[in-house]
Amino acid sequence: MLYQIRLHGHLDKDWQDWFGDVTITSEDDGTTLMICQVLDQAALHGLLRQIRDLGLPLISVNRINSGSAEEPDVTS
């Protein structure tokens, strides 16, 4: 499953190694967009735990279609 996670604040690309298979983009609006491939719900919870440990506020978590990061499938 592919997820789009938005955080308040910026993370630089050096954090990609810490998160694993994640694409990190700093947006002009002061947020960070992470695109993450996760195997299952347990892996998603582990990723969210890592984000929590950084102390950055979580804005959204969206499962996206594997064909396009622009088309949300489910919004949480």
Image (spheres, rainbow, N blue to C red):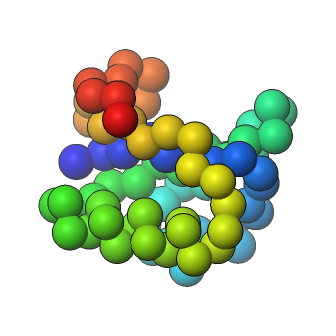
**Residue 33: quadrant of the picture:** top right
Residue drawn 49% across and 74% down? 50
| Left or right of 29 in this view: 18 | left
The answer to whether residue 56 shows anywhere in this view is yes
- In the rendered image, residue 62, in percent from the top left (x then y), is placed at 38, 36
Image quadrant containing the C terminus: top left
What residue occupies the far left of the structure in this picture? Answer: 40
The answer to whether residue 67 shows anywhere in this view is no
**Residue 16: quadrant of the picture:** bottom right
| Left or right of 69 in this view: 74 | left
Residue drawn 48% across and 60% down? 22
Residue drawn 36% across and 45% down? 3
> How many tags in the picture?
0
- In the rendered image, residue 53, in percent from the top left (x then y), is placed at 57, 76
- In the rendered image, residue 35, in percent from the top left (x then y), is placed at 47, 48
| Left or right of 29 in this view: 42 | left
* Depicted 45 relative to depicted 24: above or below: below
Between residues 16 and 45, which one lies in front from this camera angle? 45
**Residue 13: quadrant of the picture:** bottom right
Residue drawn 16% across and 61% down? 40
| Left or right of 24 in this view: 28 | right
* Depicted 34 relative to depicted 60: above or below: below
- In the rendered image, residue 39, in percent from the top left (x then y), is placed at 19, 62
What residue occupies the far top of the structure in this picture? Answer: 71
